Amino acid sequence: MTTTSPPSGAWRRPGLLAIACFLFVYALLQGLHLALRDSAWHAVLIDTLTVAPAAALIDLFFAQDGVAADGPRLRWPQGSLSLSTGCDGLEVITLYIAALFAAPVDARRAVWALVGGVLMLWALNQLRVLMLYGAYRHARDSFDALHSFWGPLLLIVPAILVFHLVLRARR
């Protein structure tokens, strides 16, 4: 009769390894984002990947407002709205990516989940910016709650649900 015992050493436990992997990848991605904050990459992230598509989306729903992208700002004849770090949805995206790296999933599923999840979160962030613009322009009293509570939930809840589906998916 043979008995098996758990591997010696706390770092051999899968749970702690997953936590360490998550923390490492998240810290690496956040550190990279902070290091590139005032660089051309940051301008691409905010101006090109966030503000420009948001202006086009806003124009679909609020064409009469005349919104245009102007660097990190959404401008219209009566004013502007600045988008900065945090408006790009990168905090939730980096959390999602770090969770995928730590998840016990095969590489093929992880790649699909990574690409699909990041695209989904980017699209939801565009929707969030649209909603924030609409609130800022047409329902100013709801802007703060949307900006600080409901908007982030629009990204966090789907990220959790997709991650859960990735973990439960069968080959």
Image (cartoon, helix red, strand yellow):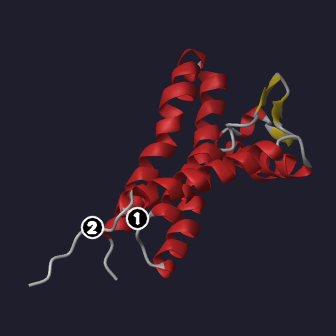
Name the residue located 37 percent from the left edge and 58 percent from the top edge. Answer: 15
Identify residue type, mark 2. Answer: Pro
What element does badge 1 sit on?
Answer: helix
- Residue 147 position by quadrant: top right
For disc 2, the marked residue is 6
Q: Quadrant of the C terminus?
A: bottom left
Q: Are marks 2 and 1 in contact (CB under 8 Å)?
A: yes
Name the residue located 64 percent from the left edge and 39 percent from the top edge. Answer: 129
Foreground pick, 51 / 40: 40
- The image position of residue 21, as x and y in percent, is 52, 59
For disc 1, the marked residue is 12
Crowd band around label 2 with a 10 angstrom C-alpha radius: few (<14), some (14–19), many (20+): few
- The image position of residue 100, as x and y in percent, is 50, 63
- The image position of residue 130, as x and y in percent, is 63, 39
Foreground pick, 66 / 41: 41
- Residue 85 position by quadrant: top right
- Residue 24 position by quadrant: bottom right
- With respect to residue 35, does 22 lie above or below? below
Question: How much space separates mark 2 and mark 1, taking CA atoms?
Answer: 9 Å
- Name the outermost residue toward the top: 141
